[in-house]
Image (cartoon, helix red, strand yellow):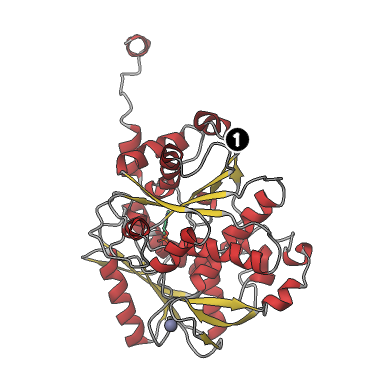
Amino acid sequence: MGSFTGYKCSICGTEYQPDEVTYTCPKDNGILDVVLDYQALKTKSTEELILKDEHSLWRYFPLIPVKEMIGEGTTLRSAGWTPVFSPPQIKDKLGLKKLWIKDESSNPTASFKDRASAILVARAKEIGAEVIVTASTGNAGAALAGMAAAVDQESVIFAPKTAPPAKIAQLLIYGARVILVDDNYDAACKISLEASEEFGWYNRNTGYNPFTAEGKKTAAYEIWEQVLLTNQLDRPLCVFVSVGDGNIISGIHKGFKDLYEIGQIKVMPRIFGCQSTGSAAIYNAYISGKEEIIPVQATTMADSISVNMPSDGLRALRAATQTEGAYIAVEDQKILEAISDLGAVGIFAEPAGATALAGLKAALQEGLVSEEDPILVMNTGSGLKDVKAAKQAAGEAPVIKPSLEELKELLEG
Ligand SMILES: *Cc1c(COP(=O)(O)O)cnc(C)c1O
Ligand SMILES: [Zn+2]
């Protein structure tokens, strides 16, 4: 730690000192990248960068821009360090040589968002913030509420009132102050920013607070340790991830850029962003070949990636264009199928989580990647968070009277 030297604007490139700004670039509202002391980090060995005794994202503390590891003995200290699986059924069905699935549903609040929130809460403590606020489609809020609860930090969550009931219940059970907005996610973002300005609350919003990506980048470090350091790959790893606001994909890109910058990886993984055709603002920009994100009217059932105007769109676009990756858009029907594919190997994903696998299948069909490419698919969230979607994917179970006769009829029928 202590490697935090300032910020750099993703639009105009202006650099700022750590205490000069809090959120976006004062000149153009560009999202800020956190800059580390790469010179110092370059001199460190792999062993010095990984704290093997920490079984969480905190194992990469030397690369994380907060001063203190907080929350010992709490769930905050257990975010990240999620498992990677190589289910042979999916690998063989798709004809792949190498496939990994990184399962973020095993995070303490059951989504990828814990990575961001753990770091955010640590940052909040460092700057003495009394209240943290966020807008959320559900998971970011649950993650903030859960991580904040772990260390008695006050949190306020604005979520669309249409968020899946399990996510709302989760927010409430963690004891956050939950305010449901009678509008969409974009509107929840707007009111959270206004509230943060009015009441001085520290704002965690995705694509606004530069520290969320610093938490999310730890997934890239884990991929480095779990896949790149332990396998001889003769081609760049292709990483598939679902995209809404674009902060997860930007964070993963940042993580790999950090590692490349300090000489820990020699080949950049290729990053593939997967969106629903019902919420495809960044995909559209990718196809147009321009760095211009035009808002859409989001209609997808994958609520965690349902966004009209992605708040981290530019960096998210570059995550693909700068790594020879691509963007892929898939129909919601394909997302439901991917939920079933993952379920069939024992992984329960929410729609946004399964979108990455749906994207991989489309990318193989379109020839964006080949069977020879080593592939890693992120499942970003648990299916228990959205039971309605799971039921849509799985259909209904038959009901019988508890009699052998009826059972036989059913089995034969
Ligand atoms: C938030 C979220 C995403 C998308 O992340 P963005 O940073 O908005 O692109 C994908 N899947 C799940 C489960 C999420 O909660
Ligand atoms: Zn700027």
Q: Nearer the viewer, residue 387 or 32?
A: 32
Label 1 crowding class (10 Å Cα cut-off): few <14, some 14-19, many 20+?
Answer: few
In terms of image quarters, where does ligand 1 lie? bottom left
- Residue furthest toward the front? 289
Residue indicated by mark 1:
97
Residue 362 location in percent, x, y? 41, 40
Apparent side of residue 43 relative to residue 83 in the rendered image (left or right): right
For numbered disc 1, what is the local secondary structure? loop
* Disc 1 CB within 8 Å of nearest ligand 1 atom: no
Apparent side of residue 309 relative to residue 22 in the rendered image (left or right): left
Could one spot residue 150 in this view of the protein? no
Q: Nearer the viewer, residue 317 or 168?
A: 317
Q: Amino acid at mark 1?
A: Lys
What count of labels does the image hold?
1
Apparent side of residue 344 relative to residue 122 in the rendered image (left or right): left
Residue 244 location in percent, x, y? 37, 59
Q: Residue at x 77, y 73 (%)?
A: 43
Q: Quadrant of residue 405?
A: top left
